[in-house]
Image (cartoon, grey):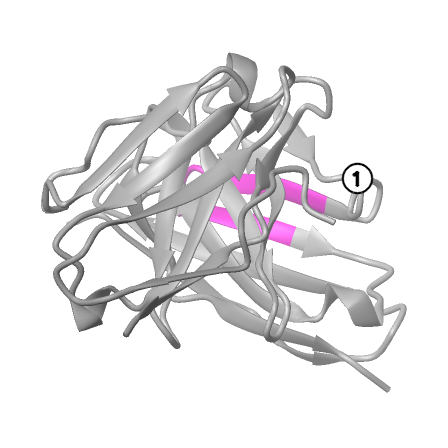
Amino acid sequence: QSVLTQPPSVSAAPGQKVTISCSGSSSNIGNNYVSWYQQLPGTAPKLLIYDNNRRPSGIPDRFSGSKSGTSATLGITGLQTGDEADYYCGTWDSSLSAGVFGGGTKLTVL
Amino acid sequence: EVQLVESGGGLIRPGGSLRLSCAASGFTVSSNYVTWVRQAPGKGLEWVSVIYSGGSTYYADSVKGRFTISRDNSKNTLFLQMSSLRADDTAVYYCARGAAGLDPWGQGTLVTVSS
């Protein structure tokens, strides 16, 4: 059971938009920055979003992040087949004094 | 180029010990936060431990008292000493720069705990 809750799967057609939610509590998302990671099959995770809504250099603006209260959302527009991957949210939990991740969401581009 | 390369994984019997290494290049481990994350086969990411630039360390409850994170500044290398290993410690272990916003990640090293 993950501290952060994500939907197990989402799907959408190429060119469409999808959002992935990440729900937590005041001890984690509510008071700490959220980051998002993309893990393509057989590869290490890659940072997509940090500090709730900032993109590292090289990450296209099709990827966006937002946070409201104790929830965060990853948005992906202009879906491509190459976006098929597992997506994870992560943050710090001040009560646990530990990092935490969501359980991951598998994106299928139909 | 900032890069992290893990090593030290392998097959180990339950109750055994293993030390993982994470060699960094392109940045100085002593001036950065560095985190260990693991992923059991077919499962999601699990945060394991972090060492801050000042030397503070934090651990997941699942490994507290069994795992120790450390670094060798002269070798610019991070370590994860794992003891009293259990079957549920079987996973690919990744190191990554940062504490929040982990970037980049190493390629991972597989630890298999089995008799």
In the image, B75: left or right of B21?
left
The dominant secondary structure in magenta is strand
Residue B56, x across and y down, in percent: 60, 22
Q: Chain of mark 1?
A: B
Residue A104, x across and y down, in percent: 51, 55
In the image, A76: left or right of B50?
left
Q: Residues within 10 Å of mark 1 (few under 14, many from 20)?
A: few
Task: Say which quarter of the image contains residue A109.
Answer: bottom left
Disc 1 residue type (three-letter)? Asp
> In what element is the residue under mark 1?
loop
Q: Which residue is located at x 31 percent, y 35 percent?
A: B28
In this view of the protein, can residue B32 be seen by the observer?
yes
Among all residues in the image, which is located at the extreme bottom? Answer: B115
Task: Say which quarter of the image contains residue B57.
Answer: top right
- B94 shown above or below A48: below
Instruction: Tell which of A67 and A57 is nearer to you.
Output: A67
- B22 shown above or below A56: below
Q: Which residue is located at x 59 percent, y 23 percent?
A: A28
The magenta region covers: B68-80
- A21 shown above or below A10: above
**Residue position for label 1:** B61
In the image, B110: left or right of B53?
right
In this view of the protein, can residue B72 be seen by the observer?
no
Q: Which residue is located at x 80 percent, y 47 percent?
A: B62
Instruction: Tell which of B20 and B36 is nearer to you.
Output: B36
Q: Which residue is located at x 32 percent, y 43 percent?
A: B103
